[in-house]
Image: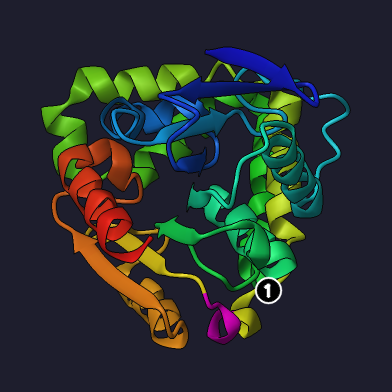
Amino acid sequence: MKTTINELAVFTNGSDENKAIIFVHGFPYDHRMWNAQIEELSKNYYCVSYDIRGLGESPAGDGQFTIEMFVDDLEYIIDKLRLDRPVLCGLSMGGYISLRAIERMENKFSGLILCDTKASADNNAVKIKRAGAIKKINREGLNPFVDEFVRNCFGDDFVRDHKEEYDRVVSHSKENYPEGVKGCLLAMAARTDTTSYLSKIAIPVLLICGEEDKLTPPDVMMSMADKIHTAEFVVVEKAGHMTPVENSKEVNKHIYNFLKNSI
């Protein structure tokens, strides 16, 4: 079911009497990247997904975004739906939002799933790269940026063997507002570093990383896991940065085991 909360497009699947999981998508994608997880998990869990401000069906407004604003949106959705300590699941930029949400209000959650993400803030080189991406969108439009960026998120085997699905993801990403995409780039470049909080996390945490991830490779996520006392870390074969899409069966298995054994 689709609803609008605080201007954002929010989607719910499954019975609201079950334990809730809220999915936070990555950049520059939308809630549809979680389709395979929601299709499976909604049989036993109340699955909530939404389009981050400026992406998918959620409005871009003036495109002046911060991660703090995205966390405010997440908190508003949780409160509006009256979710009782949901499990929080985020990928990449969704992981940045999730980590900051845990730092701000860990008591609102019962578990955390981090897919292909990191706690460290952008260094100067990455900030300059994001500035270059904004310049590219201003000069050439959104499509060339999407073609280049999305290709780097997927492993070679998936692009070759699942071309139709890959092309669909690219097409969806090109439907975004340019102002929204640029606003997310600014928000990520300005985000805070949440590394110091990792050792303080008390709720169960599952970290999932694709073995071919070029953006947040396994050694980066393993370093995060080592700092979290409650962490379980898994590497997913035949996947790049978009593990829930590239190897959904394996990701679903790990999430199910985590929920069953830890939550």
x and y, in percent, of residue 29 in the image: 51, 32
- The residue positioned 71% from the left and 17% from the top of the image is 4
Q: In the image, 196: left or right of 259?
A: right
* Left or right: 209 in relation to 150: left
Relative placement, left or right, of 198 versus 214 is right
Estimate the x, y position of residue 15 in percent, counting from the top left: 43, 25
Q: What residue is rendered at 31% in x and 42% in y?
A: 244
Q: Quadrant of residue 141?
A: top right
Q: Would you place residue 95 above or below residue 173 in this image? A: below
The answer, for residue 202, to whether it is visible in the render is: yes
Magenta stretch in the rendered image: 198-202
Q: What element carries label 1?
A: loop
Identify the amino acid type marked 1.
Asp
Between 4 and 129, the one lying in front of the other is 4
Q: Nearer the viewer, residue 55 or 20?
A: 20
Q: Which residue is drawn at 58% across and 13% down?
A: 2
Reading the image, the residue beneath label 1 is 193
Horizontal and vertical percent for residue 240? 28, 51
- Which of the 4 image quarters holds residue 218? bottom left
| Residue depicted at 74% across the width and 32% down the height | 80
